[in-house]
Image (cartoon, helix red, strand yellow):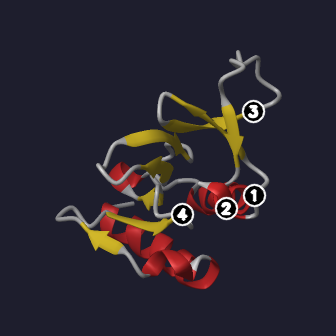
Amino acid sequence: MNQALYSTITLKYLTKNHPEFLKNIHFKEDQSFDSFIKSRSGNRFLWIATYNLEITIGFENHRKECDWHFHMGASAGNNQNQELEELTQELNKILNNEQVFILENDKYIPFDENEEQVVDENNFFFVWDEI
């Protein structure tokens, strides 16, 4: 699969399933794209990208500094349907305030209660609507 086709399929999926991301979409020379929505406060951007035949999501601040990002597999398009389903699962967790984030060094990092993460008493927890 080539980058143009990969991005076209992803764009059609976003149009049907996550149209809020279509308001801010930027296409690159290689036919990849990135798109984003702003948090309620405008403090962070939740972005989706299709670079290198891979769907990636993450948070970015207004200085374009990335807090975190997550890759939906690296199948070069061979498992794109599965990766798009995973994208929806992750976006729904974030947008429905099910994913908790910990504020650490001015970065909102996903908190996974199943992993052993050291939580300092000075850390604060947030969900998407609070960021």
Any mark on residue 129, and which? 2
Q: Position of residue 109 (x, y in %)?
A: 58, 36
Which residue appears at 70% of the width and 52% of the height? 127
Amino acid type at circle 3 is: Asp
Determine the CA span between mark 2 and mark 4. Answer: 7 Å
**Earlier along the polypeptide chain: callout 3 or callout 4?**
4
Depth check, front residue: 123 or 3: 123
Query: Residue 31 vs residue 55: left or right?
Result: left
Q: Is residue 119 above or below residue 57?
A: above
How busy is the neighbourhood of tag 2: few (under 14 within 10 Å), some, or many (20 plus)? few
Tag 4's secondary structure? Answer: loop
**Earlier along the polypeptide chain: callout 1 or callout 3?**
1
Q: Position of residue 123 (x, y in %)?
A: 66, 27
Return the residue found at the far right: 114
**Earlier along the polypeptide chain: callout 2 or callout 1?**
1
Residue at image mark 1: 97
**Earlier along the polypeptide chain: callout 2 or callout 4?**
4
Residue at image mark 4: 39
Tag 3's secondary structure? Answer: loop
